[in-house]
Image: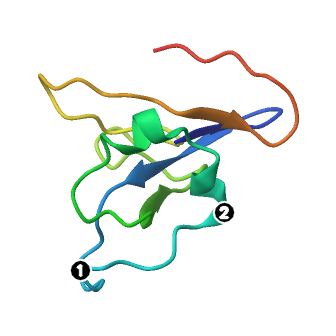
């Protein structure tokens, strides 16, 4: 889930967090905006729980300011683009 802001952007990793019950918590209202056709591809048992990437953190490998988005090598990745105010452009 990628969120655009006026001068920056942030993101959430949609994945299961250790220690959460198998049934998972209630799905947060922010996740309800994501169409069912995309939710079906979320990891098993994710239950809408996010590990959040925080804007402004530094990349531990090179010290550059964040956010740094880490992606799995050799795997397809889907971005769900959202914004709190206006439509933003995003590209990798």
| Up-down relation of residue 46 to residue 26 (above or below) | above
Q: Position of residue 90 (x, y in %)?
A: 60, 18
The reply to whether the C-beta atoms of the residues labelled 2 and 1 are less than 8 Å apart is: no
Between residues 33 and 9, which one lies in front from this camera angle? 33
| Side of 4 where 50 appears, left or right | left
One can see residue 68 in this view: no
Q: Report which residue position mark 1 lands on.
A: 22
| Up-down relation of residue 57 to residue 72 (above or below) | below
Mark 1 neighbour density, 10 Å: few (under 14) some (14–19) many (20 or more): few
Q: Residue at x 41, y 44 (%)?
A: 39
Q: Position of residue 88 (x, y in %)?
A: 75, 21
- Distance in Å between CA atoms under marks 2 and 1: 20 Å
Q: Position of residue 73 (x, y in %)?
A: 14, 27
Between residues 2 and 8, which one lies in front from this camera angle? 2
Q: Report which residue position mark 2 lands on.
A: 29
Give whichever of discs 2 and 1 has the lower sequence position.
Answer: 1
| Side of 39 where 29 appears, left or right | right
């Amino acid at each position: 889930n990628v969120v655009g802001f006026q001068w920056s952007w942030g993101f959430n990793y949609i994945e299961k967090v250790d220690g959460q019950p198998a049934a998972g918590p209630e799905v947060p209202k922010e996740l309800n905006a994501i169409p069912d056709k995309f939710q079906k591809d979320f990891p098993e048992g994710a239950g809408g729980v996010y590990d959040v990437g925080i804007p402004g953190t530094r990349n531990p490998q090179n010290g550059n300011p964040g956010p740094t988005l880490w992606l799995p090598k050799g795997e397809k990745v889907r971005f769900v683009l959202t914004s709190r105010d206006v439509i933003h452009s995003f590209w990798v």
